[in-house]
Amino acid sequence: MFPEIFIKNENSGHCGHGGFIILVAYQRRMVLFERDNEIYRDRDALREDYQPDELVGRDEELQTYQAALQPVINGEQPNNIFLYGKTGVGKTAATKYLLSHLREDAAQYDDIDLSVIFLNCDGLTSSYQIATRLVNSLRSEANQISTTGYPLASVYEMLWEDLDARGGTVLVVLDEIDHVNDDSILYQLPRARANGDLETAKIGLIGISNDFSFRDDLSPKVKSSLCEQEIHFPAYNAENLRAILEQRGDVAFHDDVLSDEVIPLCAAYGAKDAGDARQSIDLLMKAGDLARDEETSVVTEEHVRRGRRALERGRIKEGINGLTEHGHLVLYALLTLDLDGEAPVRSRDVRPRYTRFAELANRDPLVPRRMRDHLSELAMLGIVSVSERNEGRRGGTYREYALDMDVELILSAMMETVELVGVHDSIASYVEEDDTDGSPTLEDFTEV
C-alpha cells in the first residue's frame, strides 16, 4: 500500500502572459498505529498488578487477616502469619490490600514506625539467598553485599544489625515461600527477638504458600513459630468470581461492550479451573482483545470460548515444558490412570505406574517423597486437581489426585515423553504409533 500524494496549485506570483503555476506535491505519512478505545476504557484494570479499591469475595478471610495484623496498630509484637491456598485465590492480593491500609493507618500514630519488606521467593531456593536479599533491601545501593561468599551465620548477623538499625515494627512478607528448600530462615526470623538477636526491632513474618503440603513438611519447631496464625484461602466459587469480574469489568470496559453472557461464562470457567481469579480475569481480557482485533463493538460468548482455548493451550504448554523429566513421567502415569478410570488416585497408587514408566525410559525412579513433590507441583500449576480425604482414625488423612485438563492438550505438550516411554493402551486412540521405530509396544504395559 502506497502513501497518498496530494497535488496543490501554487501561483508563482507573476502576472501576465509570463505567469506560470507551480505544482507542489505533499506526501502524507502512512499511519500504522492509531488509538483504539472502542472496547476498553482502562485495559490495565485487568492486569495482575492492578489493585482495586475494594477486595470482593474474601470477606471472611479479610476479617481474620485484619485481626491477625491488629497487634501492629496496638504497638505490640506482630503475629507471624501463614497463608495457604491454590494459585489465584487472593492471598497476595489480600496481603497487599491490607498492608497498604495498615501503613496508612499506622502513620496516624507517632509511636508506630512500620516498615514492610515484600519478597517473592520464586527463583530463591535457600535461606542464604533470602537472607542476603533481605539485607540488601535494608541497605542503600552503595552498601549492598554480594549474594555469595559469606557464611550463613555472618549474613544473619548483618541482618540482625540492619533490622535493629531500622527499628520499629518490620513485617517481612515471603510470597511463594514453598520454593525454599531449607527452613533455617523460617525458624530464625520469627524467633530472632526471643533468641536475643534483636533488641529494638519487632519482626513479624508473613509466609504465603501455594502448596498445601509445604506446611506439613515443616519441622515442628518451625511450624510452631511460622504458623502462629494460619489463614486458609479456599478456591473461589462462581459467585465470588462473578463479583470480581463485574468489579474489574466496570473499570476496564466501556458501557454496553460486554454482552450479558460474557461475565457469567468467564466465572463458570474460572470456578471449573480450580477457582482461580487470575485465570478468570485473563480470560475476560483475552476475550476483549479478540473483539478488539476483529474491530467489533461487542464482546460475545464466542470470544470467551475462543479465548479460553487459546489460553489453555498456552498455559498447559508452558507448565508442562517447565517440568523436569521425572515431572513428565509422573504426569504421564497420572494421565493413564485417569483414562483407565482409576482417578481420583492416591500417590501410593500412582507410584507403581510411575516406576514402570521410569524403567521403560531407562531412568532411576525417585523416592516416594520426591514423586509426591511432583504431584504437588502439578496441582499448583492447575494441571491436576487434588482433594483432601479424611477417614478418621482408621484411614487417616490423605490426598487424591485427578487430571484437570484436556487430554489432547496435555499429550501435545509431552509427546517426547510418550515417545521415550511408549504408547500406553489408554492413550492409543489419541496418538498414532509407529511400530517400526523400535519403541516399547502396548504389551509392555500389561503389568501396570
Image (cartoon, helix red, strand yellow):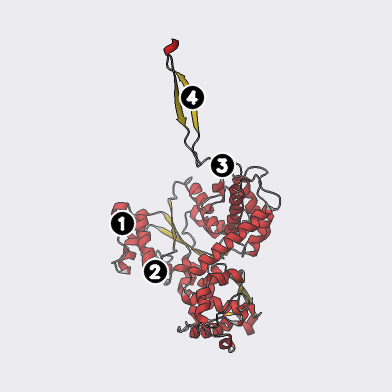
Residue 55: tell me if it is visible. Answer: no
Q: Label 1 belongs to which residue? A: 144
Confirm or deny contact between disc 2 and disc 1 (CB under 8 A): no
Locate residue 447, reporting x and y percent: 58, 89
Instruction: Inspect the image, locate mark 2, and give the three-letter code of the amino acid beneath it.
Output: Ser
Between the C-alphas of marks 3 and 4, the distance is 32 Å
Q: Position of residue 287 (x, y in %)?
A: 61, 53
Cα–Cα span, label 3 and label 1:
45 Å
Task: Name the side, left or right, on which 356 lies relative to 110.
Answer: right
Mark with earlier residue (3, 1): 3
Q: Earlier in the sequence, mark 2 or mark 3?
A: 3
Marks 1,4: beta carbons within 8 A:
no
Q: Which mark identifies residue 36?
A: 3
The residue that disc 2 covers is 126
Is 107 or 402 nearer to us in this picture? Answer: 402
Query: How far apart in space, not on screen, are marks 2 and 1 (Cα)?
Result: 19 Å
Q: Secondary structure at mark 4?
A: strand
**Marks 3 and 1: CB-CB under 8 Å?**
no
Left/right placement of residue 421 relative to residue 266 reads left
Q: Residue at x 51, y 76 (%)?
A: 417
Compare marks 4 and 2 and give the one earlier in the sequence. 4
Residue identified by numbered label 4: 8
Closer to the eye: label 4 or 2: 4
